[in-house]
Structures are given as structure tokens and as C-alpha cells.
Amino acid sequence: MLNKPSKIPSSTDTVLVFPIDPATSKFDAKSYYSGLTDNRVDSEEIKQVLIDLETVIKPISEQEARGNKLFNLVLLIIVMTFISVEVFALFIKNYTLLCLELVIFLVFVGIRWFVWGNIKKRYKKRYADESLRSLNKHAAGFVQKGLSWKLPESYPHWIELHKEYMTNPGGYSAPAAYKQEESPGTNLYQNSYYQNQYNNYNQA
């Protein structure tokens, strides 16, 4: 199960936002209709892309949830052990032991945040790698219609469909002419449509 994001942006005239339900790992495309892309793609085409992404995201999110539970269980055991030793040290008035335990605990907290941060980065990379491979199957058809999928920094909490035909009129029909944008995220419009384009996303 995915964590619930603090805020999900709304769709705009040039960017359509499809949020995911953290409980089910399914994207919400109920509000989409072909008129939102000037009849360039119908709802079934959108749904197929999102279903393929859900197939990729769900097993990763389930594995992440199991890892989180195990990590929190180990953390709880360590904290309880620390509290027990601290209480014992106070009881026997061994202040040297008390200070030593406190230092060890602070070191542990630092290590915990370092390890947790690296784990989150690895999962973020997995979401990006697997999702971009899935999107690559659909990229060519969407690019030819002036549309491109983008992974925001908070992916997989939502995914964005950018209307390139509005923001880059005339250029969307030639994917090779597109350039990597400087802002975080990933657009699928290069020759292979994703190649190394996820670098910005992974480094965010």
C-alpha cells in the first residue's frame, strides 16, 4: 500500500493529472473524456496505459509495504530495549551507562534515517524504471498525437499527461527533435522514448 501524499495537484489546460488510490494502487481516470485532449485519444486508450502502470506499481508497493512493517517492527524492538536499559540504569543509578545508552541511541537514529533514505531511493528508482518501460509501449502513438506522459517527483502518487500540441505546437510529430527538459520529471519523447530520460526523476 502506498503512502498518502500531502497534496495532489489539479489538472490544468495543458496538463492532465491522474491520481492513484493508495489503498488499491489504481489510477482514477473517471473524469477523463476525449474532449480534454481535443478528441486526440479516447478514454479506453488512457485506461489501457493506466492499467499497464497499475500492473507494474502494485507488486512493488506491496513489497514496499511489507518492508516498511518489518523495518518498523525492528525499530520498535530496539526502542523498547533502549527504554528498558535506560530505566534499569536509572534504577541502579549508573549514570555512565545512562549516558552511553543515550549516545548509542542517537547514533542509531542517524543510521536509521540514512538506511531508510537509501531504501526509499531504491524503491523510487524501481517505480521509475518499470513504469517507463511500460509507458514506452504506448509512447509513440501518444507523441504522434501531440501528447506525452510525465512522471512527477511524487510518482507514483499521480501521473501527468502533457498536451505538447498546445505548449509545443508543430514540434510534437518529430520525437527526435525534442530536448530533455530541465525541470524534474520524465517525458517520453526521445528516439527510444525513455532511454536514460529517468535520470532527473531518480536524482530528485
Image (tube, rainbow, N blue to C red):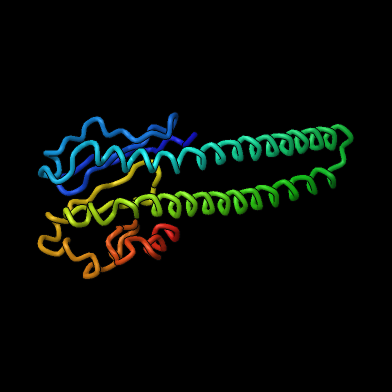
Q: State whether residue 133 is above or below residue 86.
A: below
Q: Image quadrant of residue 169?
A: bottom left
Q: Position of residue 138 (x, y in %)?
A: 30, 51
Residue beneath the point at 17% across and 35% down: 33
Residue at the location (21% across, 41% down)?
A: 11
| Residue 12 vertical placement versus 201 (above, below) | above
- Counting labels gives 0
Where is residue 142 shown, x and y percent of the image?
Answer: 22, 52
Residue 177: image location, x then y, percent: 21, 70
In the foreground, 174 or 180: 174
Q: Quadrant of residue 197?
A: bottom left
Residue 95 higher or lower than 133, as above or below: above
Q: Residue pushed farthest right?
A: 92
Q: Quadrant of residue 101?
A: top right
Name the residue: 66% across, 52% down.
Answer: 111
In the foreground, 65 or 189: 189
Q: Is residue 2 left or right of residue 179?
A: right
Residue in view at x 39 percent, y 47 percent = 154
Q: Quadrant of the C terminus?
A: bottom left
Q: In this rendered view, identify the residue nearer to me: 166 or 79.
A: 166
How far across and down, in percent of the image, does residue 120 sit? Answer: 53, 49
Q: Is residue 23 left or right of residue 151?
A: right
Residue 175 versus residue 166 in the image, above or below: below
